[in-house]
Amino acid sequence: MTLTAHAGSRTQTAAALSHVDKWYGSNQVLTDVSFRIGRGEIVALIGRSGSGKSTVLRVLAGLSTDHTGERRVDVAPALAFQEPRLFPWRDVRTNVAYGLTRTRVSKAEAQKRAEQALADVGLTDFATAWPLTLSGGQAQRVSLARALAAEPQLLLLDEPFGALDALTRLTMRRLLLDLWREHGFGVLLVTHDVDEAVALADRVLVLEAGRVVHTLDIDTPRRSPGDPSADTERYRTDLLDALGVDI
Amino acid sequence: MILLALWQLGSALRLIPQDVLPAPSLILEAGIELIGNGQLADALHVSGVRVIQGLVLGGLIGVALGTAVGLSRWLESTVDPPMQMVRALPHLGLIPLFIVWFGIGELPKILLVALGVSFPLYLNTFSAIRQVDPKLFETAQVLGFSFWQRFTRIIVPSAAPQVLVGLRQSLAIAWLTLIVAEQINADKGIGFLINNARDFLRIDIIIFGLIVYALLGIGTDAIVRALERRALRYRA
């Protein structure tokens, strides 16, 4: 696989949580959460609303600090939210360049790399557009470009396609896989979409009431959306069963 | 336009007594006279400098305090209550006090304008900063913005439109304050021009002076509205 050349072996850890507990007041929202993400690996985290998916991601991203247990992040992470969260008063290119804030490159260099990232997500022509003029899918691609601008080795995605229409979601899935093949970053994908998890991930974790209740390895190679196989069906059924959904 | 024509016609037919309300043509003549002998330019200069000095002083204080209180809960609990108490005082009512404290020179006029101007800017800046989308701050944290970067990249552009609304209110108050302050004790400026005209029963000059005040108010408001459009140009 080409991705090993970019990001090292999957046996090397990109990030891991072990025995993480977290409380909001007297409410325990995470209980003994442990898992690891290998380099270049795509791990999906699925669960119902309120199961603690986003909290896990926030702990990994360092946005939440009052947890117990161990958090380990060995590579440079980047995060994209469910909403694009662009800065409406700056053009698209500057928004993407903001993704390079930590790298402390010069402004000119940041703009250049922002254009490169925009080209990656197919939005070269929108560099000077205002964010509010973009469609939902375009804005989410800008958000992805901002996260990718600093060439992270781990991408944390919090329901990144959750607010998009069904057709745009399929396009975005495809885009994410293309980018992943090109750059080889690891991904933690938080989603409530079983099909999305099966289509994209190497491994799926099912979260329920703050616990990882099920882990599923996806062994078949990634297929394009709308090309189901017997395996895909089996994985779907398995995950829906773990989520307690009757079909 | 029609109103102006009726006014002129009524004056010509002597339906409007000219010692109460002179015809538009007479007011225009008075205006030309004041422009010609340089009195208007002198008065505009003096009044303009007063407004600008008061606006800059009061604006800086209002925006600085509004920013500080908007950013700090601690300052909100210590600075905001006294500010609200001072705000409850009608600032024009302080004129006698200001005369006693600061005399009848430029200082009390400028300070009065500054006082009137500072509150709308304080209140609008304060609330503008509190209304910045917290999700953008979280995004800033993820992207690793420094405090200064959060300030320049998020707080300033996000708060600017509402601060400009405050500036428009402040400008209206600035002119109003100046008019009152100049009526009472001034030997220069547009207010003095009007007061002086009263002593000589030059109603045409009084009305012309009022029109100048109105035009100044409209003009400065138009400038701020242009700034608002620029600050909001990203809104498609």
Image (cartoon, helix red, strand yellow):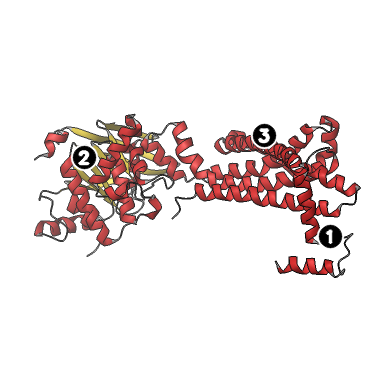
Is residue A242 visible to the viewer in this orientation of the structure? no
- In space, the residues marked 3 and 1 are separated at their CA atoms by 39 Å
Q: Nearer the viewer, residue A201 or A184?
A: A184
Query: What residue sits right under mark 2 in the picture?
Result: A186
CB atoms of marks 2 and 1 within 8 Å: no
Horizontal arrangement in the rendering, residue B74 relative to residue A107 (left or right): right
Q: Label 2 is placed on what type of residue?
A: Gly
Q: Position of residue A50 (x, y in %)?
A: 36, 51
Residue tagged 1: B22
Q: Label 3: few (<14), some or many (≥20) within 10 Å? A: some
Q: In which quarter of the image is residue B47?
A: top right
In the rendered image of this protein, does residue B125 appear above or below residue A227?
above
User: What's the chain of the residue with tag 3?
Assistant: B
Check if mark 3's residue and mark 1's residue have beta carbons within 8 Å.
Answer: no
Name which residue lies at 45% across and 36% down. B150
Question: In the structure shown, which secondary structural element does the residue marked by tag 2 occupy?
Answer: strand
Q: Disc 3 or 1, which lies upstream in sequence?
A: 1
Which residue matches tag 3? B57
Look at the numbered disc 1 and give the secondary structure of its residue: loop
Q: What residue type is labelled 1?
A: Pro
Q: Which residue is drawn at the image coordinates 66% and 52% (left, top)? A: B218
